Image (cartoon, coloured by chain):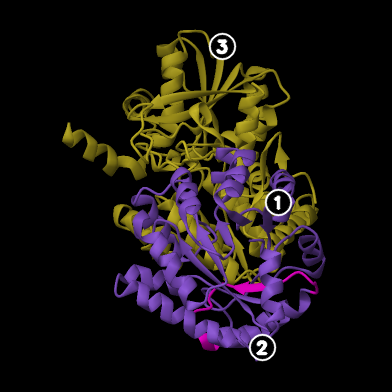
Chain colours: A purple, B yellow
């Protein structure tokens, strides 16, 4: 399913999208399908499935640890695409990974693997718009969305440039929960959401872990909320994982329904 | 924006959240790099604080023994015992001109952290150094050195608890405090403008050699030999000679051999046998597995123990302007003793790799008749490592 169609469908129902991130292969390769099912049962609209990289510089310690567990469990791009192809899900899947894994596999081969396994979009946090031409061309040829990020420190000029390149949605980095966040974080988040003026759906992530925070983000004008580390924490605990994933998803999804 | 690439290498492969900071740094550097007041102040610190210029020493005993005329560029005599301060004093001064009040740096064994502490303290910065918890345990002396100068050392407990995790934490700090903080990278690696900026600050080495060798020999050397991890001492001595008819030889750490385990290389020879890839902000030659996961590197010398190499070095190797060579742990150790015994100079284990290559290649004629070795650091810091190794033998 295309990301644009999903966002449209939700908009028509007056709902905000819930994007749930987990790392494929964490804690092991066999568990990932059940984990994804739990998130979807709870109401996740889009699944961001991380393809783990050895040096995840854009991630916090939680997702870094998840990547290490997944790599130890033997996750690699071959197994990733095989796993994704075998998932029986009706929601769009987005692959979140780092550029070297794409570069090494070959851009064309990687994007074609996305298409054949059922990945709708790519998020590459270490690939800024300036460096993205080759991948962007290939993605647009193959019909895969390439999603770019904007941050509270991104200038208006850059926002415009990034909006001209992103497709599917634009990923807005809030500062919630990031080391060293300031007390006016809500103001900073609202500010960046309002500075991104576009018809492209705006999904906000980084540090959103509960319904209360999600509600604030939605009130600030987000079309989607992205939750990752909170799910990864549950997986890491190893305790009643599927039930707790479903419950947290349900709880957050409840505030995404605005009628 | 200026050109961020060296051939196909370099660039800015970083999260969006860092792009404005890189842009600000680039603009700051463009503004001050040729500013007379900045340069005058930089020269003052290089001379009176760092102890430049460093001698170009004719190693007579070594020359005689190996049958070629060998000069040593004595970066081991820079304050702190290595070339690292050339860069940290330059970047710290730039950060001051840009109005920053806080420095963050990563360090592996602690040499760059120590040089950052020296520059940061002297120029009045609040200085924070991130260091893997495994390294703070292994390198307690350097932790003490930094702390004595008032620098806060943060042991990093995440991941493998080593250099790459320290880089992650330093980046997170920078991301959160970018308004008042400068991230002081220690080598010619990372996103543009770091490779260019660090190269420029380290070029004082090569510029001095140019003058000194003309005074002493009336000509440029046939070859220049420098050890290469990230490559800052190599770029520093090579760069002023790129347009000259001088052979440039980059010696990498061969560690325990050119072999691999599942997720590690037993060496650090990314320039010699690495592949095109993207690591920590730049496209360069890196050590990676078949899927593009970064392999851990290995070397007897912490300063060469790195899975990547500066992008400009990768480009110079591609076009054949520099020759990558490999020296293993045993050869480096032998050279460490050889220079100590023959010349009364104890070299850093990093620099020992360059010395070892000259010992090995002098006879073949590859180096010509006049050779300059960049003696990038002194070996006092390595005595514990060396003694430990010999006890085990």
Of the two numbered discs 1 and 2 in the rendering, the one whose residue sits closer to the viewer: 1
The correct choice, above or below, for A226 with respect to B353 in the image is: below
**Cα distance in 3D space between marks 1 and 3:** 58 Å
Check the residue under mark 3 and report the chain it is in.
Answer: B
Left of B227 or right of it: where is A185?
right
Identify residue for label 1: A143
For the record, the magenta segment spans A197-212
Identify residue for label 3: B368
Residue B389 is marked as: none
Both marks 1 and 3 on one chain = no
For the image, the number of numbered tags is 3
Of the two numbered discs 1 and 3 in the rendering, the one whose residue sits closer to the viewer: 1
The correct choice, above or below, for B238 with respect to B388 in the image is: above
**Cα distance in 3D space between marks 1 and 2:** 32 Å
A82 in magenta: no
| Disc 2, SS | helix
The correct choice, above or below, for B53 with respect to B156 in the image is: above
Quick check: marks 1 and 3 in contact, CB under 8 Å?
no
Residue A184 visible somewhere in the drawing: no
Mostly what secondary structure, the magenta segment? loop
Crowding near pointer 2: few (<14 within 10 Å), some, many (20+)?
few
Identify residue for label 2: A219
Check the residue under mark 1 and report the chain it is in.
Answer: A
Quick check: marks 1 and 2 in contact, CB under 8 Å?
no
Residue that appears at 52% across and 47% down: B84
Left of B389 or right of it: where is B233?
right
**Cα distance in 3D space between marks 2 and 3:** 72 Å
Q: Nearer the viewer, residue B124 or B309?
A: B309
Both marks 2 and 3 on one chain = no
A205 in magenta: yes
Q: Mark 1 vs mark 2: which is more N-terminal?
A: 1
Residue B184, position in %: x, y? 58, 57
């Amino acid at each position: 399913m295309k990301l644009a169609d999903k966002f449209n469908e939700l908009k028509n129902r007056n709902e905000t999208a819930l994007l749930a991130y987990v790392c494929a292969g964490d804690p092991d390769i066999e568990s990932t399908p059940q984990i994804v099912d739990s998130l979807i049962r709870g109401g996740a609209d889009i699944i961001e499935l991380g393809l783990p990289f050895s040096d995840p510089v854009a991630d916090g310690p939680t997702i870094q640890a998840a990547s290490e567990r997944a790599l130890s469990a033997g996750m690699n791009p071959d197994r990733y695409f095989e796993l994704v192809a075998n998932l029986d899900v009706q929601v769009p899947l987005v692959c979140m990974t780092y550029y070297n894994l794409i570069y090494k596999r070959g851009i064309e081969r990687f994007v074609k693997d996305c298409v054949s396994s059922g990945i709708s979009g790519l998020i590459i946090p270490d690939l800024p718009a300036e460096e993205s031409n080759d991948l962007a061309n290939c993605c647009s040829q193959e019909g895969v969305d390439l999603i770019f990020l904007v941050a509270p420190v991104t200038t208006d000029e850059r926002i415009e440039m990034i909006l001209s390149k992103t497709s599917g949605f634009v990923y807005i980095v809030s500062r919630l929960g990031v080391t060293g966040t300031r007390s006016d974080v809500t103001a900073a988040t609202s500010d960046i959401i309002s500075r991104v003026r576009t018809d492209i759906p705006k999904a906000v992530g980084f540090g959103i872990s509960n319904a209360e925070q999600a509600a604030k983000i939605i009130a600030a004008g987000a079309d989607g909320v992205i939750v990752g580390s909170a799910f990864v924490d549950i997986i890491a605990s190893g305790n009643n994982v599927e039930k707790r994933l479903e419950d947290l998803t349900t709880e957050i999804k409840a505030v995404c329904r605005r009628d | 924006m200026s050109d961020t690439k060296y051939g196909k290498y370099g660039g800015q492969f970083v999260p969006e959240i860092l792009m404005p900071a890189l842009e600000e740094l680039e603009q700051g550097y463009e503004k001050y790099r040729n500013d007379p007041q900045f340069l005058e102040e930089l020269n003052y610190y290089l001379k009176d604080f760092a102890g430049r210029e460093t001698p170009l020493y004719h190693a007579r005993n070594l020359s005689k023994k190996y049958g070629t005329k060998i000069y040593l560029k004595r970066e081991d005599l820079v304050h702190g015992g290595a070339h690292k301060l050339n860069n940290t004093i330059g970047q710290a001064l730039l950060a001051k001109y840009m109005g920053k009040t806080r420095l963050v740096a990563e360090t592996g064994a602690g040499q760059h952290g120590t040089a950052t502490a020296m520059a940061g303290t002297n120029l009045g910065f609040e200085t924070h150094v991130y260091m893997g918890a495994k390294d703070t345990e292994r390198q307690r002396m350097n932790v003490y050195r930094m702390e004595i100068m008032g620098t806060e050392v943060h042991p990093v407990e995440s991941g493998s608890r080593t250099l790459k995790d320290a880089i992650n934490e330093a980046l997170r700090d920078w991301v959160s405090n970018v308004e008042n903080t400068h991230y002081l990278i220690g080598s010619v690696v990372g996103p543009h403008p770091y490779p260019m900026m660090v190269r420029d600050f380290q070029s004082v080495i090569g510029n001095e050699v140019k003058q000194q060798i003309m005074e002493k020999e009336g000509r440029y050397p046939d070859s220049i030999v420098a050890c290469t991890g990230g490559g800052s001492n190599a770029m520093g001595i090579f760069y002023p000679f790129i347009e000259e008819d001088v052979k440039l030889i980059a010696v990498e750490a061969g560690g325990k051999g050119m072999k691999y385990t599942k997720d590690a290389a037993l060496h650090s020879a990314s320039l010699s046998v690495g592949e095109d890839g993207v690591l920590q902000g730049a496209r360069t030659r890196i050590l990676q597995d078949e899927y593009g996961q970064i392999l851990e590197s290995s070397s007897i010398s912490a300063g060469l123990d790195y899975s990547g190499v500066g992008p400009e070095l990768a480009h110079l190797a591609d076009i054949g302007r520099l020759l990558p060579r490999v020296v293993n742990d045993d050869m480096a150790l032998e050279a460490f003793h050889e220079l100590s015994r023959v010349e009364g100079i104890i070299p850093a284990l990093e620099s020992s790799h360059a010395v070892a290559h000259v010992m090995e290649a002098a006879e073949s004629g590859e180096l010509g008749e006049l050779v300059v070795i960049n003696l990038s650091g002194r070996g006092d810091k390595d005595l514990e490592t060396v003694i430990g190794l010999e006890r085990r033998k």
